[in-house]
Image (spheres, rainbow, N blue to C red):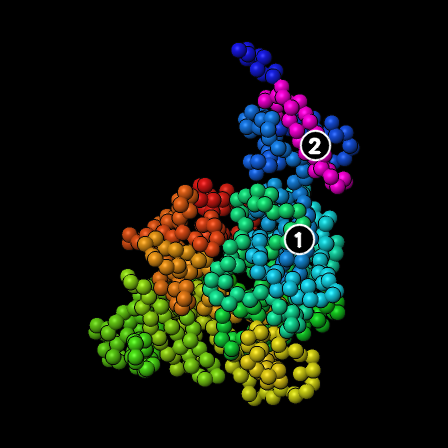
């Protein structure tokens, strides 16, 4: 038997591999240690034994078998459970990583492999001048993502060299921790009114950014359009199941890169993950707005989100306008303060948040809930019946619509009352054909009730559509976001309106346009090049007067108005079901979608959610809603932690406020997304 003093002095050999940056091969070093030696002491012994004078402060111990970092340097080997058979690696915590940004540009920078991904993304965004890092995350692309491209490279004799922006000196290691993008309200930045990029004096706010030393506008300018051939070679999801596969690669925000098997110099995608773009401000967000525009642009070009041909032409016209302005803006110098005020004025009406406008807490909000009353036409789809719309007198009050035989019957019992809280609202519009329809999918006990409304003109449509959108979120027309929503819908309709009066100058304008660059490959195949160019230029007449930042914000806004905007898809199997379904996760709801037809079956709102949790043994997510509604599903296309994090992440983002000095509650984020694993 050993006495306690003998036991404490009992020592043993620990082998540690050293990942020395200046030498190609790793070296093994043997240390004599005892169980009561703390981790910091082990590192000190290592550095003494290596005996190479250099800064070792970024090095830490990685335990290979347990797949974890030993970062608590005051813990002893006994407390950590480290014994003689442990394989430890002494390696730098910050390593190089290649990140493909939303604009398809690759940056190479030094990133923490030991901090949780949530923190690492915050550091990356600070280095790239992107505020609100909580909206972004890292995605490990599936095999298909780069497959097409590689095939092409094999056929070419010359290897393709990728244009990589190298930010190796990026100081994401040290420096004071700044809350993401919080600046004093009294700061009046100077910025280019054409491109919206901060002028060099403004860049001193981001003095810890490597981009401050280089050209500050590198990431704030949109990339020139890709050739149609390059576009055709990029991966395009063909079905909802394909889209679900794309979302399988989101990294776990509560674990480090190293714990998730990410290798040094690996390529990951930096993307906006959560579709709630908070406090977009052209003063501070030149890079963020441009990257958001680029993510929207690629989603439309690669058909990751569906839109009609009419909408595709609007997006094409805006892209064409933005690419023209970007190429000319790059050659122009910064301009005077007076023009800055013009941009401010032009953008003051353009609030690009999902909820719409600025909060004006007027007295009317409390006392008077407005109502809409008008003649509309209604149609309910039934099998074997042609679409026949019938006119009724409609009254919209609070969050529900009632309809009557005609105006005289308004005081009596309605034919039917439709409660729109939690419904899906889908535009059914063709401006050229003067069709202004609203499709409502109203949740009922056994699925969705489908109702079509038809309006007579743009103004009527904008008012009723805005009221339906707000009612679906549980808000009334008294809400301050109602009027901005009406204006947003009207401005989008006007962009769609063909400007037949203004004739496009043939020949001259067409010279600098390759129309196939601005539409999806499938849309390009349907039309001859000249015909497509003429239609894009025709649509361009409606946006030709816009400034660059305004055009980008309009593009983002138009993207947000698409029915499928903000939906992230996963292939799931619901408890009790015999077939697979698609689960759509949005910023305010979950949707069960038929995998074969793509038709929504049921919608559940987050506002009605009482609790959600995960059974980690069977990897099943269970959610309870009001009125004794509960669902449970297993995730087939991704780990259930990814879906769980999405739900918790959206609930976390809904707690943010516009207080300039607000700091993010990181603990709350991990509490809501971690699932207490």
Q: In which image quadrant can residue 156 be found?
A: bottom right
Does the image show residue 416? yes
Please report the residue visible at 34 percent of the width from the left and 57 percent of the height from the top: 578
Residue positioned most to the right:
53
The label on residue 605 is none
Q: How far apart are marks 2 and 1 (CA)?
A: 29 Å
- Answer above or below: position of 509 versus 559: below
Q: Percent from the top left, x then y, of residue 313?
A: 55, 77
Magenta span of residues: 11-38
Residue under numbered circle 2: 28
Question: Which of the two discs, 2 and 1, sits closer to the camera?
Answer: 2
Locate residue 415 relative to residue 107 in the image: left or right.
Answer: left
Locate residue 245 relative to residue 544 in the image: left or right.
Answer: left
Mark 2 or mark 1, earlier in chain = 2
Residue under numbered circle 1: 98
Q: Percent from the top left, x then y, of residue 135?
A: 54, 54
Specify few, some or many for label 1: CA neighbours under 10 Å numbering under 14, 14-19, or 20 or more.
many
Q: What element carries label 1?
A: strand
- Answer above or below: position of 349 versus 116: below
Q: Is mark 2 on a helix, strand or loop?
A: strand
Is residue 353 located in the magenta-colored stretch of the structure? Answer: no
Please report the residue visible at 60 percent of the width from the left and 66 percent of the height from the top: 234
Does the image show residue 646? no
Please report the residue visible at 70 percent of the width from the left and 29 percent of the height from the top: 29
Is residue 19 located in the magenta-colored stretch of the structure? Answer: yes
- Answer above or below: position of 26 versus 107: above
Specify few, some or many for label 2: CA neighbours under 10 Å numbering under 14, 14-19, or 20 or more.
some
Q: In which image quadrant can residue 59 be found?
A: top right
Locate residue 228 relative to residue 491 in the image: left or right.
Answer: right
Between 371 and 507, the one lying in front of the other is 507
């Amino acid at each position: 038997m050993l006495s306690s003093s003998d036991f404490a002095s009992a020592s043993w050999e620990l082998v540690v591999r050293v990942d020395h940056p200046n030498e190609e091969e790793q070296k093994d070093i043997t240390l004599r240690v005892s169980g009561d030696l703390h981790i910091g002491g082990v590192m000190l012994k290592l550095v003494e034994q290596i005996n190479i004078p250099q800064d070792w402060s970024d090095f830490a111990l990685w335990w290979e078998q347990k797949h974890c970092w030993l970062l608590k340097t005051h813990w002893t080997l006994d407390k950590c459970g480290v014994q003689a058979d442990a394989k430890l690696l002494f390696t730098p915590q910050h390593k190089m990583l290649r990140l493909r940004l939303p604009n398809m540009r690759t940056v190479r920078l030094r990133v923490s492999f030991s901090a949780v991904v949530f923190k690492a993304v915050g550091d990356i965004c600070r280095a790239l001048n992107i505020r609100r890092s909580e909206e972004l995350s890292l995605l490990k692309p599936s095999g298909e993502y780069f497959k097409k491209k590689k095939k092409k490279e094999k056929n070419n004799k010359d290897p393709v060299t990728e244009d990589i922006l190298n930010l190796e000196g990026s100081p994401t290691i040290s420096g004071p921790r700044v809350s993401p993008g919080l600046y004093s309200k009294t700061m009046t930045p100077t910025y280019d009114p054409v491109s919206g990029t901060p002028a060099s004096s403004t860049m001193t706010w981001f003095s810890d950014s490597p981009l401050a030393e280089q050209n500050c506008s590198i990431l704030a300018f949109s990339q020139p359009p890709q050739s149609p051939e390059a576009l055709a070679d990029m991966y395009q999801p063909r079905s909802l199941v394909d889209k679900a596969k794309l979302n399988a690669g989101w990294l776990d925000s509560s674990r480090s890169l190293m714990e998730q098997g990410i290798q040094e110099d690996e390529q990951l995608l930096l993307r906006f993950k959560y579709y709630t773009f908070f406090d977009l401000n052209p003063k501070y967000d030149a890079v963020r707005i441009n990257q958001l525009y680029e993510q929207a642009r690629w989603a439309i070009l690669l058909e990751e989100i569906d839109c009609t041909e009419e909408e595709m032409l609007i997006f094409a016209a805006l892209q064409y306008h933005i690419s023209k302005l970007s190429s000319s803006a790059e050659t122009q110098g910064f301009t005077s303060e007076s023009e800055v005020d013009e941009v401010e004025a032009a953008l003051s009406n353009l609030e690009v948040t999902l909820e719409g406008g600025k909060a004006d807490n007027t007295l009317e909000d409390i006392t008077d809930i407005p109502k809409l009353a008008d003649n509309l036409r209604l149609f309910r789809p039934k099998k074997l019946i042609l679409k026949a719309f019938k006119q009724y007198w409609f009254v919209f009050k609070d969050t529900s619509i009632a309809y009557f035989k005609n105006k005289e019957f308004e005081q009596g019992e309605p034919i039917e009352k439709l409660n729109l809280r939690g419904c899906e609202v889908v535009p059914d519009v063709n401006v050229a054909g003067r069709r202004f329809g609203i499709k409502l999918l109203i949740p009922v006990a056994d699925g969705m009730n489908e109702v079509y409304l038809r309006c007579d003109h743009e103004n009527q449509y904008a008012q009723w559509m805005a009221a339906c959108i707000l009612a679906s979120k549980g808000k009334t027309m008294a809400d301050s976001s109602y009027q901005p929503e009406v204006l947003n819908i009207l401005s989008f309709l006007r962009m769609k309106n063909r400007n037949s009066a203004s004739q496009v100058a043939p020949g001259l304008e067409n010279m600098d346009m390759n129309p196939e660059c601005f539409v999806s490959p499938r849309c390009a195949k349907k039309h001859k090049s000249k015909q497509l160019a003429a239609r894009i230029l025709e649509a361009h007449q409606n946006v030709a007067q816009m400034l660059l930042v305004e055009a980008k914000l309009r593009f983002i806004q138009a993207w947000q108005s698409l029915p499928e905007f903000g939906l992230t898809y996963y292939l799931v199997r619901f408890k009790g079901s015999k077939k697979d379904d698609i689960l759509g996760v949005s910023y305010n709801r979950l949707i069960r979608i038929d995998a074969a037809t793509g038709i929504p079956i049921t919608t559940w709102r987050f506002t009605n959610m009482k609790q959600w949790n995960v059974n980690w043994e069977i990897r099943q997510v269970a959610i309870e809603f009001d009125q004794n509604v509960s669902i449970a599903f297993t995730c087939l296309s991704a780990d259930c932690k990814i879906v769980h994090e999405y739900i918790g992440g959206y609930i976390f983002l809904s707690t943010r406020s516009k207080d300039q000095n607000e700091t993010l509650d990181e603990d709350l984020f991990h509490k809501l997304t971690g699932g207490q694993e």
